[in-house]
Image (cartoon, coloured by chain):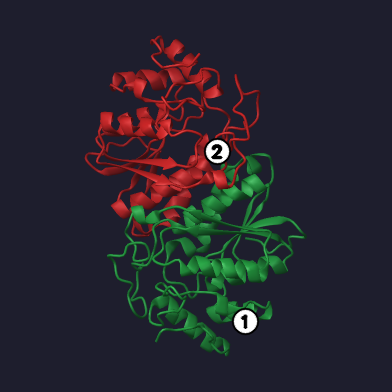
Chain colours: A green, B red
Amino acid sequence: MTSSTGAGAKAVVLLSGGLDSATTLAIAKDRQFDCFALSINYGQRHESELNAARNVANAIGVADHKIISVDLSAFGGSALTDPSIAVPAGKNSGGIPITYVPARNTIMLSLALAWAETLGCRDIFIGVNAVDYSGYPDCRPEYIQAFEKMANLATKTAIEGNKLTIHTPLIDLPKKDIIKTGIALGVDYRLTISCYQADEAGRACGICDSCRIRREGFAAAGIVDITRYKT
Amino acid sequence: MTSSTGAGAKAVVLLSGGLDSATTLAIAKDRQFDCFALSINYGQRHESELNAARNVANAIGVADHKIISVDLSAFGGSALTDPSIAVPAGKNSGGIPITYVPARNTIMLSLALAWAETLGCRDIFIGVNAVDYSGYPDCRPEYIQAFEKMANLATKTAIEGNKLTIHTPLIDLPKKDIIKTGIALGVDYRLTISCYQADEAGRACGICDSCRIRREGFAAAGIVDITRYKT
């Protein structure tokens, strides 16, 4: 969770196609890491998120971009993977919302760990955020610290004495500061999708919790929100 | 890592189709857990391992059996997923062998965690073994403890106060004792496959490190080895 400079070292960057992960990739590049972007097709409702990830990877520039499929919809239990559960409109009323995908960050970080090991790289970036987030347990600093500790016992890389670091450059930033950081680094947020139920053309619903947080972030940052909303 | 009794509670049991995981499933059943078997198709060289998992799940009896695909061969780096890397014959000569699949147990446990959460279950079984194993970092007790700690920070289940336990009933057993335990519980080891390069008919090569450990285990247990070997 340090903010060291990469100086050309390889890093795996988890890239969802959303605002936060695009900013995280831009930060990793700015810190001079040679970036390997990893997107997970976990059975999301729509593919537009993965298209956004492709466009963001191309725009920012990466050494490689892999999309790995793992069908979390087989387990159900989330509005993001189970078509029979509706995505709620408006602000989450407290507690852990139905849009939470069980163990998603753990699975995504585990896959990043596998790729990091085959690349011989010691740095993984993930755009989790514990401020303007939606109440997900796997976005908290204590969770990331525990994952990093586990990862350093799990792998050949670690056994051989190369400590692995999970970088979370956004973890304590309000959404407005994430947006300001990304704008300063030249991120084109038109390419990103935050919406839980964007349509095939990549247009956002404008009413889900993720859209709400994004809208408020642009407003608080004093930056015009160029997101394409359906409503 | 406790040995509590399930008394009808649900448990997710990782089931590879090998000797260890079949024994682990039998132990979980014996402890009165209602077992949900999970197999991972991670791009292994052969499908016979997954067929073995299906047969073992049917023979021992489970509430459900899911096979989840995640293509780890996309990352390469292991003889078990990369056809261009040969599986070595004979005993591993020290260090971490080329059959090690990067972050495999972390990925499998993460998927088990996701299913456990949607089932509302607090128990996961995995047949890792730190005695007669092949030098894999993610089979050691300190790794399992770190995963359990991370898992208890990662999930809704844990946040709501239901502690999750990773059960490793084989972790300190020599192979001969694993086999004796399974035989006592009625496991039909003919259904299992340990070989790293079994053929489509499920016959073992008889010469890889995993075959060697299995052969020596049956011999040490004083039990006739009914494994179908090609050689």
SS assignment at label 1: helix
Would you place residue B75 above or below residue B156 in this image?
above
For disc 1, the chain is A
For disc 2, the chain is B
Quarter that holds the N terminus of chain A? bottom right
Would you place residue B221 above or below residue A115 in this image?
above
Q: Is residue B11 left or right of residue B44?
A: left
Residue A170 visible from this viewpoint: no
User: Mark 2 sits on what residue?
Assistant: B81
Quarter that holds the C terminus of chain A? bottom left
Residue found at the far right of this picture: A7
Q: Which of the 4 quarters of the picture holds residue B59?
A: top left
Residue at (68% x, 47% y) in the render: A120
Horizontal and vertical percent position of residue A160: 68, 39
Front residue of B5 and A18: A18
Checking the image for residue A180, the label placed there is: 1
